[in-house]
Amino acid sequence: MARYNSVIDAIGNTPLIRLNRASEETGCEIYGKAEFMNPGQSVKDRAGLFIIRDAQEKGLLEPGGIIVEGTAGNTGIGLALVANALGYKTVIVIPETQSEEKKDALRLMGADLVEVPAVPYRNPNNYVKLSGRLARQIALTHPHGAIWANQFDNVANREGHVVTTAEEIWHQTGGDVDGFICAVGTGGTLAGTATGLKRRSGRIKIGLADPRGAALFSYYTSGELSSSGDSITEGIGQGRITANLEGFTPDFAYQIGDEEALPVIFNLVREEGLCLGGSSGINIAGAIRMAKEMGPGHTIVTVLCDYGNRYQSKLFNPAFLKEKGLPAPDWIGRPTQIDIPYEAA
Ligand SMILES: Cc1ncc(COP(=O)(O)O)c(C=O)c1O
């Protein structure tokens, strides 16, 4: 095992894990990049690191300065851990609807949390717009200044995936990779990894796995940004072309519903010991569709964005699933099945 000087050096270089049921079902080799193994337990540690490094290189961050961001949670956790390790502070604006587990992880890191109602991007009080205004206000008064991380339109996010995620996948597969697919929150992971892989080999196909309620599937298939339906997944589902998505076009696009993604998540827990968050379910369901379209014999990589414990109160909570009209697997919350008699000492 490697020896690191700081937790920051432990970001990235995550393993690829073969997804056995998905591979057998399609006759392809489907691998998941285990981003939940990053120190902040998600793919967004990479964005946090590259955004902060970029601000440092541009001379925008003073020691003790504040990093302000609007986030569904994971980017905030990544920013907070990198900021703590480098001597900065974080102020995180998060929609109230995001999981309590992610908010707790942010509190644990000592981030100052601003919880706001979830309203659409066109509303001036949307969490992203609000975080930008807050950053400007704090920058005026705080003795060490403040920056806005601006993950959606800050291309340091995408660039991080060009030089890390794509290169790792290329080397881990020995160049034997035919496809890459994932969902979009900011677009950093998809557009950055696509750019890096296409640079390595123009024959690698790129897929978008879009949850219901997002507008990108319609944009890339009909040219129009329009959406319908919704999803319980967090951190993904975009309604506009962010700066991170500019210049990017997928080869394949799929719209994936929760009823298709959730069984994938539940089966992985029981059959393969992998407990993942909802966006990973959208990604894997997308990889299965792409594998079926490309045909047997191909190697396809997707992203295991974060760990399931981040959504224990939602995705793995039968009452929550029932309220959303989604089926819960019978093993969650059931009483212990084996009655082992034992004698007290
Ligand atoms: C759980 C989860 N999955 C996927 C993503 C999407 O990644 P990206 O912002 O790189 O598109 C995010 C982003 O916040 C996330 O939190």
Image (cartoon, rainbow, N blue to C red):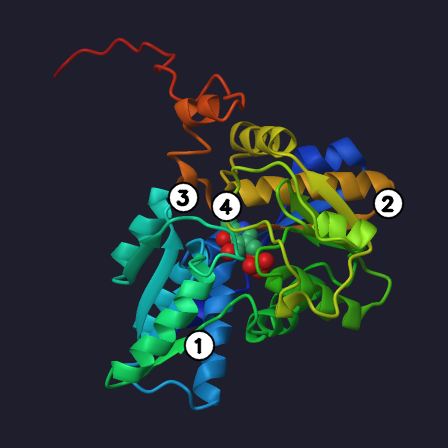
* Residue 138 versus residue 32 in the image, above or below: below
The disc placed on residue 68 is none
Which mark's residue is nearer the viewer, 3 or 1?
3
Q: Where is residue 91 in the image (x, y as percent from the top left)?
A: 32, 66
Mark 3 belongs to which amino acid? Thr
Q: Distance between the residues labelled 4 and 3?
A: 9 Å
Q: In this view, does 222 lie to the left or right of 240?
A: right
- Left or right placement of residue 95 versus residue 326 in this view: left
Looking at the rendered image, the disc whose residue lies closer to the viewer, 1 or 4, is 4
Q: Judge from the rendering whether residue 292 lies leftward or rightward of residue 2; answer left or right.
A: right
Q: In this rendering, does residue 300 appear at all? A: no
Residue type at mark 2? Met
Q: How far apart are marks 2 and 3 (CA)?
A: 37 Å
Would you say the beta carbon of the disc 2 residue lies within 8 angstroms of ligand 1? no
- In percent of the image, x 81 and y 50: which residue is there? 221
Asked which secondary structure carries label 4, the reply is: loop
Is residue 140 visible in the rendered image? The answer is: yes
Image quarter for ligand 1: bottom right
State the residue position of label 4: 234
Q: In this view, does 19 lie above or below 224?
A: above
- Label 3 vs label 1: CA separation? 26 Å
At label 1, the amino acid type is Ile
- State which tag comes first along the sequence, 1 or 4: 1
Residue pointed to by mark 3: 97
Q: Mark 2 points at which residue?
A: 294
Quarter holding residue 92: bottom left
Q: Which of marks 2 and 3 is in front?
A: 3
